[in-house]
Amino acid sequence: MASNKTLQGFGLDTSAVLRLLTGQPPAQAKRAFALVNEAREAGRRAIVSDLVVSEAYFALHTHYHVPKRQAVHQLLKLLQSGLVEPELTGCALDALQAMATGPQKPGFVDRLIHAQYARLGARSVSFDRAFRKLTNALLLAP
């Protein structure tokens, strides 16, 4: 149920973020840019959740054939642009920054999961050997 409070911004879904990143289709991209610019001018936030960042990452790679490292850089640039903002309690920005400067394994979503658990004070546990590269992760032997 929606409250009567005045909304402070917009939560963008994956389709809106992809329009901002790809410019396709042009009419929808133009509308998406207009919305986030209008929001910014009105002092409202255009928020992108961790889940949307994850979906956009995979959509860029799978459907738009953008290499993974380039997808990371595009998402990072968007979240740091001031046009949109990552969710306040989110970890996507941290995970993207780690991917942009480090090895590709573990992947973006694994790094996001690890960052979210770390914020909760929990240790990541996995059978995936790539997790060894993450601080304080516990690798279970098969």
Image: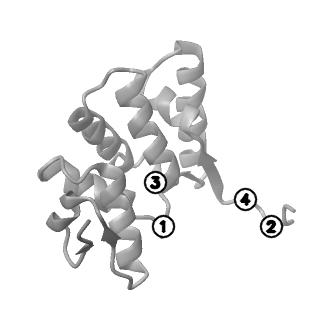
Cβ atoms under marks 1 and 4 closer than 8 Å: no
In terms of secondary structure, where does tag 3 sit? strand
What is the three-letter code of the residue carrying label 2?
Lys
Where is mark 3, residue-wise? Answer: 85
For marks 3 and 2, give the CA distance.
21 Å
10 Å crowding of disc 3: few (<14), some (14-19), many (20+): some
The residue drawn where x is 35% and y is 45% is 81
Return the disc, 4 or 3, that comes first in the chain's sequence.
Answer: 4
What is the three-letter code of the residue carrying label 1?
Leu
Where is mark 1, residue-wise? Answer: 88
What is the three-letter code of the residue carrying label 3?
Glu
Where is mark 2, residue-wise? Answer: 5
Nearest to the observer: residue 79 or residue 120: 120
Left or right: residue 43 compared with residue 86:
right
Left or right: residue 136 compared with residue 92:
left
Residue 32 sits in quarter: top right
**Quadrant (top left/top right/bottom left/bottom right) for the C terminus:** bottom left
Q: Residue furthest top?
A: 26
Nearest to the observer: residue 135 or residue 85: 135
Cβ atoms under marks 4 and 2 closer than 8 Å: yes
Left or right: residue 134 compared with residue 75:
left
The residue drawn where x is 53% and y is 23% is 29
Image label count: 4
Cβ atoms under marks 4 and 3 closer than 8 Å: no
The residue drawn where x is 54% and y is 22% is 30
For marks 1 and 3, give the CA distance.
8 Å
User: Residue 69's spot in the image, x, y percent?
Assistant: 21, 37
Where is mark 4, residue-wise? Answer: 7
Return the disc, 2 or 1, that comes first in the chain's sequence.
Answer: 2
